[in-house]
Amino acid sequence: MRQVCYLLYGLMLWGTTLLPAQEREVLIPSPISGSPFQFQDQQDRYGQAYRWFLEGDIDRGSDMLREIVSEAGYQLLPENYYVVVAHFTDAFAPIGMFHGDQRFLNTRLYGLEPDNLFFIYLSRSETTQAYVSVLATSKPSPSEENLLAFLSLFIPIIPPVQAQGIDTSQVITWVDVRQFEVPPAFRKNSDLAFLVKKRLDDENPLAAAVFDNTSRERWSYGIATAITSVNDVDITISNDGRIIVKPKPNLDLATFAVIDYHFKAIDTKAPTFGNSLHLMGGIRLANFIEPIVGLGASFSLDFIDLAIFAGYSLEFANELKEGFHIGQQLDEGENPFKLNLRGKPRFGLQIKFP
């Protein structure tokens, strides 16, 4: 058991070195070439979008906003993230995001690149110069964040607005597009707090939202409980100093602390049923060393993540040296054993963290 404790302490120290110092920075986007774009909105799509948002049909309203941006001459790329504010009135300016087929009010980002975060501001007033700033706060990944809690299982570690009418007398809709340059510290795991004002000195913002930027991950960890159909015995020394054979129970139950590598990166914050195949490796939680490797398939039950696995463990067992036999009385300090490696097929269930 001592060796297992040393290993877990090593994992704890390694986990604490992974946790980065939290960084914070205010990001201001820069206008792109050709912005602001304009659209002759003869069918009043902007007004239609306002009404759909007002009625609570966010999907139709955001589809209208997408059409306006496209008709204004700006192409939306599915791999980019576009935080969008529609300034219908000073009291009603919804904020959301365009990203592939993701819904408008979804605030999850999956790992930013240096130049794939944009801000789009739609308005009926060309002279409205929106002020936008983002407070970026770096944070650990879910795996890093939960590692100490996982290790502490084995060792002690102290560780709505009222909308007003929109002015439809002006049929030109303006589309202001700006681009962020995202520093390295905030690309993988960070919170991005957007603040949008009509003017910098306004007391109240037009819109505000926090976007969760958390990369998909390939690593997870957990507790695996396995059984084996191999019936074997342990050769050991009894209390009175004799060499004895100690049978093991049929279908020997074993518990392992394991680390998983997922072939396809997964969203650990929103797992789905049957979301990943993974390789796993770990060590048995016992007073002897027994590593395990295997292949697993994980799935989510909403309240818990489980995996089924099949693998092979390697037990460091005792084997008698030449000249010793079962039942022999040993002299004090005499060692009758040499190392024997025994392989065992294993299969079972794993509880995954996170």
Image (spheres, helix red, strand yellow):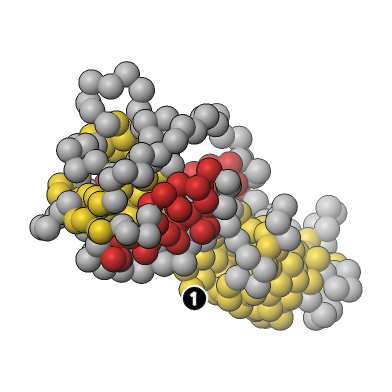
Identify which amino acid the numbered label 1 is placed on.
Phe
Residue 125 appears left or right of 303: left
The residue at 68%/78% (across/down) is 310
Q: Is residue 263 left or right of residue 22?
A: right
| Above or below 257: residue 327 | below
- The reply to whether residue 140 is in sight is no
Q: Quadrant of residue 16?
A: top left
Image position, residue 98 (x, y; %): 39, 58
Name above or below for residue 294 compared with residue 19: below
Describe residue 322's horizontal placement relative to residue 277 as left or right. right
Provide the secondary structure element on which disc 1 rests: strand
Q: Residue furthest front?
A: 169
Q: Residue at x 68, y 74 (%)?
A: 309
Residue furthest to the left in view is 33
Q: Give the number of callouts.
A: 1
Q: Nearer the viewer, residue 85 or 174?
A: 174
Task: Quickly name the residue at label 1.
Answer: 263
In front here: 205 or 52? Answer: 52
Q: Would you say 82 lies left or right of 348 here?
A: left
Who is closer to the viewer here, 240 or 147? 147
| Horizontal and vertical percent position of residue 85 | 36, 45
User: Which residue is located at x 37 percent, y 64 percent?
Assistant: 67
Q: Position of residue 39 (x, y in %)?
A: 25, 58
